[in-house]
Image (cartoon, helix red, strand yellow):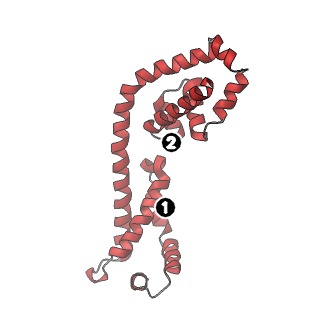
Amino acid sequence: MILPYKNGYLSTVCCDIALLNKYKNLLNSASRQHHLISIQEEAYEEAVISFYQAIKDFNESLGVPFAGYAKVKVYQGVHTLFRRYLRIWQNEVSLSAQMNTDDEDEIKEFGDLLAVDEDLADSISSRLDIIKLIHQLPPKQCKVFILVVFKGLKYKQVAKLLHISVQAVSKNYRKALAFINKSLEK
């Protein structure tokens, strides 16, 4: 089945569908490994890309069965993706440890503003207006903001809960805070 695909005898779309159906269990099992849960979609995409690269690079004259060759290439691709994310996560953890102390002060200040600042009460007709502002945020920013400000969770806890990186939590929180501050200034 691989030879006709490589030589262009069958339509590419038909071969793609047939090959993906035949090897979908391999692609799923490679991308659903326990340590890849938080990046499962990216892992599946990487598995598919690695699979197509295996098709392209496969050489029958070496006497290696395609199934074994494809499995090795798919798992290597997914492993490389995991290593890339692992480096990113390790950097985020060290950065978040440095940033957390500054961010906790900002959270407390903003929480205090929401609770007692009379100037804020004058500029916004009610707490309902504040909630409307928060719900105008994009969904991920809204979730992050609520969990950090109102639930008092740390970035690391929010990251684990939402299955995103600590850096993504920080970025979404800062964007949400900037939007709310900008809206309150109007």
Which residue is identified by label 1? Answer: 28
Q: Residue at x 47, y 39 (%)?
A: 168
Q: Residue at x 38, y 75 (%)?
A: 55
The outermost residue toward the left is 62
Q: Is residue 74 visible?
A: yes
The disc labelled 1 sits on which kind of residue? Asn
**Given the current orientation, which residue lies at the most extreme front position?**
186
Q: Quadrant of the N terminus?
A: bottom left
Q: Is residue 66 left or right of residue 163?
A: left
Quickly name the residue at label 2.
Answer: 163
Q: Can residue 151 be seen?
A: no
As drawn, the label of residue 20 is: none
The answer to whether 165 is drawn above or below residue 30 in the figure is: above
**Which mark is in front, 2 or 1?**
2
**Extreme-bottom residue of the structure:** 9
Identify whether 10 is placed above or below 80.
below
| 75 left or right of 183 in image | left
Amino acid on which disc 2 is placed: His
